[in-house]
Image (cartoon, rainbow, N blue to C red):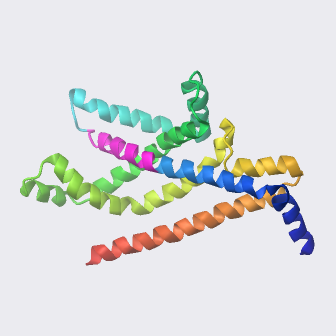
C-alpha cells in the first residue's frame, strides 16, 4: 500500500503534474458545457424544421436541410467531424482557438441527436394541447412556444440528460486538435513518467465521479419535474 501511495505521490504530486489534470478538467467541462448549450439550441431549431415534413414548395426546404444534416452527422464519426472542422473549415483561418473549434464541432454533433430527442418529445404531446391553444386564440407559434415546447422538454429531459453525459465522454477526442483536455493531460503525464497505470486510472476515476454526480443531479431534477406534474 505504501508503495502505491509513494508512486501516486511521485507521479502526480511531484512536479505539480496534478495541475495538468485540473487544467485538462477545466477544458473538458468548458467544452461540454458550451457544446451542450449550443447543441440544445441548434437541436431545437432542427427539430422544428423536421416537423415540416408535410410542407410543400419552398417551405419544405428547411425539412430537407435538417434531414440531410442530421443524417450526415449521425452517419459519420465525431472524431472525423472534429478534424474536418479543424483542418478544412478553419484550416486557413488564423487566430481561432482550438477550444472554440471544439465547441463548434461538438455543438453541431450533439444537435443532430438533440433534434431527434426534441422531435420525439414534441410528437409525444397530445394533439389536444394544440387544439386547446388554438381555442384560446393563440397563434401556431405561441402555441408551440408556451404550450407544446415546455411539455416536450419534460418528456425529453431524461434523454437530454443522457446526451449531456455522452457528450462529456465524447470530448475525450479533442486531443486530436492539440487541445489539452483531461484525457490529453493523462497522456502527457504518461509521456513524462513512463507510467500508464496511475495517470489513466486517475483520469478514469475523475470521469466516473463527475458523471456519477451529474447522474444523481439529473435524477433528482427529473424527480422534481414528475412531482410538479402530479400537482
Can residue 74 be spotted in the picture? no
The chief SS type of the magenta part is helix
Q: Quadrant of the C terminus?
A: bottom left
Q: Quadrant of the N terminus?
A: bottom right
Decide which of 178, 40 is in the foreground and name it: 178
As drawn, 95 above or below 221: above
Decide which of 40, 72 is in the foreground and name it: 40
Q: Residue at x 36, y 32 (%)?
A: 65
Q: Residue at x 54, y 38 (%)?
A: 100
Q: Is residue 47 left or right of residue 211?
A: left
Q: Which residues are magenta?
A: 37-53
Can residue 182 be spotted in the picture? yes
Residue 86 in percent (x, y) is at 59, 31
Q: Is residue 183 magenta?
A: no
Q: Is residue 150 left or right of residue 188?
A: left
Residue 75 in percent (x, y) is at 52, 38
Residue 170 in percent (x, y) is at 60, 49
Identity of the residue furthest to the top in this view: 92
Amino acid at each position: 500500500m505504501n508503495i502505491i501511495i509513494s508512486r501516486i505521490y511521485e507521479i502526480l504530486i511531484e512536479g505539480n503534474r496534478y495541475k495538468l489534470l485540473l487544467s485538462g478538467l477545466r477544458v473538458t467541462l468548458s467544452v461540454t458545457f458550451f457544446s451542450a448549450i449550443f447543441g440544445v439550441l441548434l437541436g431545437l431549431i432542427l427539430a422544428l424544421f423536421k416537423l415540416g415534413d408535410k410542407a410543400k414548395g419552398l417551405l419544405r426546404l428547411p425539412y430537407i436541410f435538417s434531414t440531410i444534416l442530421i443524417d450526415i452527422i449521425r452517419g459519420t464519426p465525431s472524431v472525423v467531424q472534429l478534424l474536418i472542422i479543424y483542418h478544412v473549415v478553419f484550416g486557413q483561418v488564423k487566430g481561432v482557438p482550438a477550444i472554440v473549434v471544439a465547441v463548434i464541432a461538438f455543438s453541431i454533433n450533439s444537435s443532430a441527436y438533440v433534434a431527434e430527442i426534441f422531435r420525439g418529445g414534441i410528437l409525444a404531446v397530445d394533439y389536444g394541447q394544440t387544439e386547446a391553444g388554438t381555442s384560446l386564440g393563440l397563434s401556431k407559434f405561441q402555441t408551440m412556444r408556451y404550450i407544446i415546447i415546455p411539455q416536450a422538454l419534460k418528456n425529453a429531459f431524461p434523454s437530454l440528460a443522457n446526451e449531456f453525459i455522452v457528450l462529456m465522454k465524447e470530448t475525450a477526442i479533442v486531443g486530436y486538435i492539440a487541445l489539452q483536455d483531461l484525457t490529453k493531460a493523462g497522456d502527457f503525464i504518461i509521456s513524462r513518467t513512463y507510467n500508464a497505470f496511475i495517470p489513466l486510472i486517475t483520469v478514469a476515476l475523475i470521469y466516473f465521479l463527475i458523471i456519477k454526480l451529474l447522474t444523481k443531479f439529473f435524477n433528482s431534477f427529473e424527480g422534481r419535474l414528475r412531482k410538479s406534474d402530479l400537482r
